[in-house]
Image (spheres, rainbow, N blue to C red):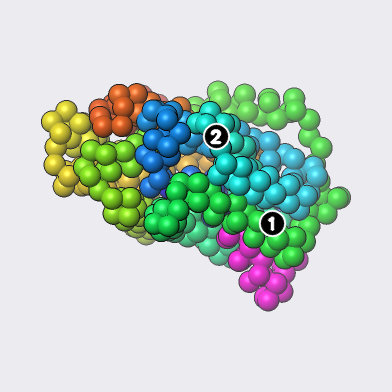
């Protein structure tokens, strides 16, 4: 699914006091092409194998919940990797860790294709997620190094577009690979993508962080900053809602192929179309929100999104309890994903807007919470087997209701300051 850009596009860049020598037009187009491709790698790793997830679990003699642990481990790798990749690139430069990350991603993906057991695949997916996180974080850092002002805003807009389009395309690509190969072929495809990007980085990217600009802040300072954020009432209510709504979405990602293929009888190809349509609905609603945010404000849009999420949960729970129709299931999940088009970008904006001096650490903590809570939710949806959607409904409803309660308990003074 779409990976939300953690820093508000353009605003922090416009506030930067440093003057950046931007690349020439021709080099700029090549740089943006490579950066956009790198940023697509994480959503591809998350979503491309989903149409084959039921077959993967069956082929490795695993339960549905064990199969979903392959998603959990990848998400954990993406979350943990973000906490380390940024500081490493700040001290060692952008290019060396990016080369290592792409090589590790390619190797991990190829070895995933050879995994002899579900537990080996779970470990390898964690490594794949760690490597993918390196690309995500360093791409954002390279944009900060290379562009400023309107140019930076356009670069961030491109990455937002990529993060929306890649999840739409990923399951369609995976479904086409499954027409002539097994789930193992999907990981071969991911490994090939990693190799291509490794060559692209080696050929097209030069170092964007000169030695004089590198930082050597210690671990103690980083931990103190994270601790301060965890106690910040301007940050945590919105960061918690952000993570919970992502967890609800990842519960859908983990369980939707089993629900639509095993319960409702859709083919992997048709499931990929449903998945892509829901992802497109999320992106479309995010664009609607972008047009309305100047008039209504992010707090109002977040509340609208939470209301939509509650309505969607009602439909999902009814389907789970009464074996409701395919039409009701399709509509409920579509509303849930569309609601996140309002929930996710606006909770991120509300969490970050008063964290100017700590924006990097706050963004890393948002990313860690996003993927870690998603990783915790994913395996729970398969606890009752691959033909019962009640656990998924319970997980989604719990995430949404806790998010609503968190916002209901948010102090009035904090809410007024965020409008």
Among the 4 quarters of the image, the one containing residue 378: top left
Among the 4 quarters of the image, the one containing residue 276: bottom left
Give the tally of numbered discs: 2
Q: Secondary structure at mark 1?
A: helix
User: Viewer-proximal residue, 245 or 134?
Assistant: 134
Q: Residue lying farthest right?
A: 212
The image's mark for residue 198 is 1
The image's mark for residue 108 is none
Q: Where residue 269 sits in the image (x, y, percent)?
A: 32, 55
Q: Is residue 24 magenta?
A: yes
Q: Badge 1: how crowded within 10 Å, few (<14), some, or many (20+)?
A: many
Q: Residue at x 53, y 41 (%)?
A: 352
Q: Residue at x 49, y 50 (%)?
A: 186
Q: Badge 2: how crowded within 10 Å, few (<14), some, or many (20+)?
A: few
Among the 4 quarters of the image, the one containing residue 340: top left
Q: Is residue 392 magenta?
A: no
The residue that label 2 is drawn on is 116
Q: Nearer the viewer, mark 1 or mark 2?
A: 2
Q: Residue lying farthest bottom?
A: 26
Q: Residue at x 28, y 43 (%)?
A: 261
Residue 12 left/right relative to 394: right
Q: Where residue 82 sits in the image (x, y, percent)?
A: 62, 39
User: Viewer-proximal residue, 126 or 216?
Assistant: 126
Q: Main secondary structure of the magenta part?
A: helix
Query: In the rendered image of this protein, does residue 375 appear above or below residue 142?
Result: above
Q: Is residue 277 visible?
A: no
Sequence order check, earlier mark of 1 and 2? 2
Q: Where residue 251 sits in the image (x, y, percent)?
A: 37, 35
Q: Where residue 360 sits in the image (x, y, percent)?
A: 63, 41
Residue 221 left/right relative to 54: right
The magenta-colored residue range is 21-37
Q: Secondary structure at mark 2?
A: loop
């Amino acid at each position: 699914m779409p990976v939300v850009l953690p820093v508000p596009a353009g605003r922090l860049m416009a506030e930067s006091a440093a003057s950046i020598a931007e690349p020439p037009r021709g080099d700029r187009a090549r740089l943006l092409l490579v950066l956009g491709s790198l940023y697509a790698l994480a959503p591809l790793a998350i979503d491309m194998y989903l149409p084959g997830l039921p077959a993967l679990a069956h082929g490795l003699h695993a339960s549905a919940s064990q199969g979903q642990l392959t998603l959990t481990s990848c998400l954990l790798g993406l979350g943990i990797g973000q906490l380390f990749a940024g500081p490493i690139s700040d001290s060692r430069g952008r290019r060396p860790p990016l080369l290592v990350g792409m090589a590790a991603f390619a190797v991990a993906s190829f070895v995933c294709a050879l995994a002899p057991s579900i537990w080996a695949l779970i470990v390898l997916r964690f490594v794949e997620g760690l490597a993918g996180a390196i690309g995500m974080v360093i791409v954002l850092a390279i944009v900060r190094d290379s562009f400023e002002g309107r140019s930076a805003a356009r670069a961030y807009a491109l990455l937002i577009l990529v993060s929306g389009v890649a999840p739409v395309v990923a399951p369609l690509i995976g479904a086409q690979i499954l027409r002539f190969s097994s789930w193992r072929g999907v990981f071969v495809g991911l490994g090939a993508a990693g190799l291509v990007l490794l060559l692209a980085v080696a050929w097209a990217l030069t170092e964007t962080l000169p030695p004089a600009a590198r930082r050597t802040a210690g671990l103690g300072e980083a931990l103190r900053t994270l601790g301060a954020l965890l106690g910040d009432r301007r940050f945590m209510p919105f960061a918690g809602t952000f993570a919970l709504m992502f967890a609800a979405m990842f519960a859908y990602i983990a369980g939707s192929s089993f629900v639509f293929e095993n319960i409702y009888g859709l083919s992997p190809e048709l499931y990929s179309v449903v998945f892509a349509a829901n992802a497109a609905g999320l992106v479309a609603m995010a664009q609607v929100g972008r047009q309305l945010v100047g008039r209504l404000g992010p707090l109002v849009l977040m509340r609208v999104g939470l209301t939509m999420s509650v309505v969607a949960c009602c439909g999902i729970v009814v389907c789970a309890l009464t074996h409701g129709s395919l039409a009701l299931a399709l509509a409920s999940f579509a509303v849930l994903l569309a609601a996140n088009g309002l929930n996710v970008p606006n909770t991120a904006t509300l969490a970050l807007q008063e964290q100017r001096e700590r924006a990097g650490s706050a963004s890393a903590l948002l990313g860690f919470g996003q993927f870690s809570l998603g990783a915790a939710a994913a395996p729970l949806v398969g606890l009752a087997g691959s033909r019962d959607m009640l656990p998924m409904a319970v997980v989604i409803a719990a995430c949404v209701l806790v998010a609503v309660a968190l916002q209901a308990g948010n102090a009035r003074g904090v809410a007024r300051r965020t409008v």
